[in-house]
Amino acid sequence: MESTKIQNLTPQGTWQGQDGKTFYKFDCILENGLVGEVNAMSADKWHIGDEVVVKDHTQGKYGPRLKLDRPRSAYGTDADRYKFSDNKKGSDETTKGIVASWAVGCAMQAAGDPAQENYDSILMQLARLALKARSIIKDEVEI
């Protein structure tokens, strides 16, 4: 998809989606000549001069409509997108939290009724069992 810039942007009010969310409506003219209505979930998402990519340009019953996005370069490189943290310790702590949450979730499914007697200790035993099983099985996985 080729990028272009917003040449003119005129606010046209707001409307409510079926889910109750407010959308901001704009008449938009792009430097490549395309014209249409564009919607956003915030009043300041788009500005004149913003570089955009046209994801869709359709003719609806109320006129031409545009779906815009930022060019990939505006999000950074692919390496930036998949890098969680430059801080190795922070990344390890995040991973530990995710694995611990997984173990507790498995334990809660297996433990049954939270109103039962000794539920907390049952939950902890099952979570530890899930972590131990994960550790053993992880070594057996072949990729």
Image (cartoon, rainbow, N blue to C red):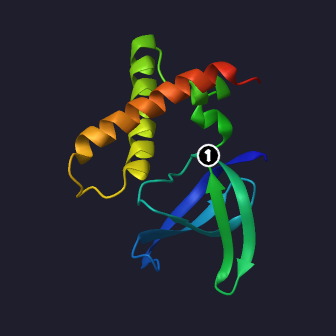
* SS at circle 1: loop
Residue at 54% from the left image edge and 22% from the top image edge: 135
Q: Is residue 99 visible?
A: no
Which amino acid does the dot numbered 1 rest on?
Answer: Arg
Quarter residue 77 falls in: top right
Query: x and y percent of residue 59 in the render?
Result: 74, 78
Mark 1 closeness class: few <14, some 14–19, many ≥20 residues within 10 Å: some
Whether residue 134 sits left or right of residue 53 in the image: it is: left
Q: Residue furthest bottom?
A: 61
Q: Nearer the viewer, residue 1 or 6?
A: 1
Residue at 61% from the left image edge and 53% from the top image edge: 6
Q: Is residue 52 visible?
A: yes
Query: x and y percent of residue 68 in the render?
Result: 64, 56
> Vertical placement of 16 versus 4: above or below?
below
Q: Nearer the viewer, residue 51 or 82?
A: 82
Q: Nearer the viewer, residue 48 or 40?
A: 40
Q: Which residue is mark 1?
A: 70
Labels in figure, total: 1
Whether residue 90 sits left or right of residue 28 in the image: it is: left
Quarter residue 128 falls in: top left
> Vertical placement of 1 versus 63: above or below?
above
Residue at 75% from the left image edge and 23% from the top image edge: 142
Residue at 61% from the left image edge and 26% from the top image edge: 137
Query: x and y percent of residue 61 in the render?
Result: 68, 87
